[in-house]
């Protein structure tokens, strides 16, 4: 009898451990709104991410223009991808179509050639179009969020880990395992420091190891030497907010933020 009780207890622990990673995904709903608000506090100095589709400026980080909900850039080419998708969704009466060739030409540089103030104004005007919002969301999902979720599933990470992966992808890009400065390179470096939950490791220890691996990469870039976003993530790990449970309070680049259930419901509604 004792033997069967022991077996049942072991099975219960295993099932509980598996379900812990099925408590939510940041792909939709309140968890998406929570994760996006956290990223927006770092990218746009506000949690009100639904209003950031019109944002565009050169922040002097060598990436040319930075714009939109997660800071697509002209240098990395995801800004070009957004505009191309927008043209696909709205082929006529599209104020950004004439900038496609210029955006393609400046990829890999911080040049404004063929862009400038008229492009900035056209971007801001386009933000009133539902097709432009859809274009930004499509590129965001395809190149960043879905990638984060795919790797988080492999590593059996909950919503906090998904957000940490997503934030790293937004800043560093997916890259390859051979590129130490990219998300995949950082993830590979973290494996040398700790086991993932999928490998039987502790989630908190692994996420801290991932941030340890990310720290020197952040310090290499002038625009990211302030490690506020990593400090926020470490705090969430210490507080065991593995499911991004509300309320949340944090400080990003000296500014204080808080997020309640009411705030998240409002953001979720604005995003519909």
Image (cartoon, grey):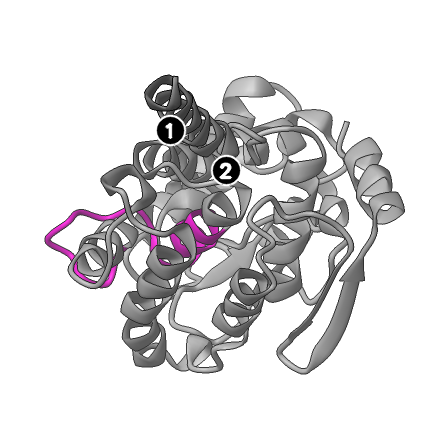
Residue at position x 69%, y 47% from top? Answer: 245
* Disc 2 versus disc 1: nearer the observer: 1
Q: Quadrant of the N terminus?
A: top left
Front-lying residue, 243 or 130: 243
Residue 13 shows in this picture: yes
Which mark is on residue 49? none
Q: In the figure, residue 63 lies in which quadrant?
A: bottom left
Residue at position x 64%, y 56% from top? Answer: 38
Q: Looking at the picture, how far across and down is residue 136, in whole percent?
A: 57, 36
For disc 1, the marked residue is: 10
Q: Looking at the picture, how far across and down is residue 241, in whole percent?
A: 60, 54
Q: Looking at the picture, how far across and down is residue 24, in whole percent?
A: 58, 31
Q: Looking at the picture, how far across and down is residue 214, in whole percent?
A: 32, 67
- SS of the residue under disc 1: helix
Left or right for 258, reference 74: right
Q: In the figure, residue 8 lies in which quadrant?
A: top left
Q: Where 153 sits versus 8, above or below?
A: below
Q: Earlier in the sequence, mark 2 or mark 1?
A: 1
Instruction: Please report the bounds of the magenta region as a residue range.
Output: 164-182
Residue at position x 25%, y 53% from top? Answer: 187
């Amino acid at each position: 009898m004792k033997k069967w009780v022991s077996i049942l207890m072991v099975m219960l622990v295993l099932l509980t451990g598996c379900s812990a990673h099925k408590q939510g995904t940041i792909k939709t709903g309140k968890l998406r709104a929570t994760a996006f608000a956290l990223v927006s506090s770092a990218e746009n100095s506000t949690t009100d991410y639904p209003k950031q589709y019109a944002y565009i400026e050169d922040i002097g980080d060598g990436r040319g223009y930075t714009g939109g909900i997660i800071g697509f850039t002209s240098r990395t080419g995801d800004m070009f991808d957004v505009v191309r998708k927008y043209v696909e969704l709205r082929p006529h009466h599209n104020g950004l179509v004439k900038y496609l060739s210029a955006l393609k030409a400046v990829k890999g540089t911080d040049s404004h050639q063929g862009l400038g103030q008229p492009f900035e104004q056209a971007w801001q005007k386009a933000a009133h179009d539902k097709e432009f919002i859809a274009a930004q969301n499509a590129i965001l999902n395809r190149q960043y969020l879905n990638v984060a979720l795919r790797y988080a599933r492999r590593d059996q990470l909950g919503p906090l880990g998904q957000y940490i992966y997503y934030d790293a992808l937004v800043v560093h890009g997916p890259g390859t395992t051979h590129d130490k400065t990219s998300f995949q390179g950082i993830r590979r470096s973290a494996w040398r420091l700790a086991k993932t939950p999928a490998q039987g490791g502790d989630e908190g220890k692994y996420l801290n190891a991932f941030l340890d691996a990310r720290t020197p990469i952040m310090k290499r870039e002038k625009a990211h030497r302030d490690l506020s976003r990593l400090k926020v993530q470490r705090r969430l790990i210490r507080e065991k907010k593995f499911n991004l449970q509300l309320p949340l309070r944090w400080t990003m680049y000296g500014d204080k933020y808080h997020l309640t259930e009411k705030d998240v419901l409002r953001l979720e509604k604005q995003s519909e």
